Amino acid sequence: MATRAPLPAESLLALAELLSSDPGDEDGADAAQGPAGGRSGPGNIGPRKASDASAAPLPPEDGKAIWSAGEVPEGSAGDASWDPREQPEYEIVFKQQVRAEDLFLGMSRKDPSTACCEDMLIKIKLPDTKASDITLDIQEKLLDFRSPQKRLLLHLPHPVDATNGRAHFLSEQSTLEVTLRMKRELDFINFS
């Protein structure tokens, strides 16, 4: 069993100087303070954050809005569990665009799985609802549907393009169909 040689006195003094906050303070009462003189904590780990004073707040797009859309965090629409309105019945269907070369010639890597789908279709069944009563708000991972009788706060299984979607109400079936383009990472299947 090997024993270590004791540290030289100058190494111990250099280590003590690094750990002490005040070179004249020998009692070690402020050993918890860092070299900068302030207390160290979890916030001192990692790079320093830029000060908030340099960022000027942007005015909201809507004159009556309190916050702009960029200031509201994703998914902060709240939980609909407290809402007394009934949750409508809904169905999520994935769609893909299939061309002749995909179907007959097999020139692409598309298969029937949801990994090859481009669009997400959400069918919401709304009996006794008029199209004028519907309010629909779509974010990247959240669909928020409201009507006087029903409320649906749906967290989407994939991120979607919130600005380029289509919605139409089929009055004879009392169904709202919302088609959203999914944001897919380019992988070995979705390479185009």
Image (cartoon, rainbow, N blue to C red):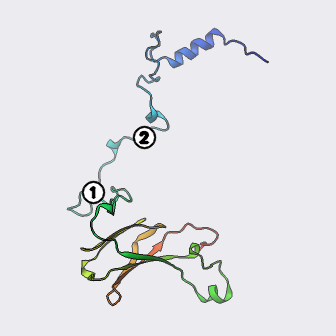
Dot 2: what SS?
A: loop
Residue named by callout 1 = 67
Amino acid found under the numbered disc labelled 1: Trp
Label 2 packing within 10 angstroms: few (<14), some (14-19), many (20+): few
Task: Pick whichever, 103 or 21, lies toward us.
Answer: 103
Dot 1: what SS?
A: loop
Q: Earlier in the sequence, mark 1 or mark 2?
A: 2
Amino acid found under the numbered disc labelled 2: Lys
Residue named by callout 2 = 49
Image quadrant containing the N terminus: top right
Residue 139, given in percent of the width and then of the height, sits at 38, 66
Residue at position x 27%, y 57% in the image: 67
Res 39 → quadrant: top left
Residue 92, given in percent of the width and then of the height, sits at 46, 75
Image quadrant containing the C terminus: bottom right
Residue 48, given in percent of the width and then of the height, sits at 45, 38
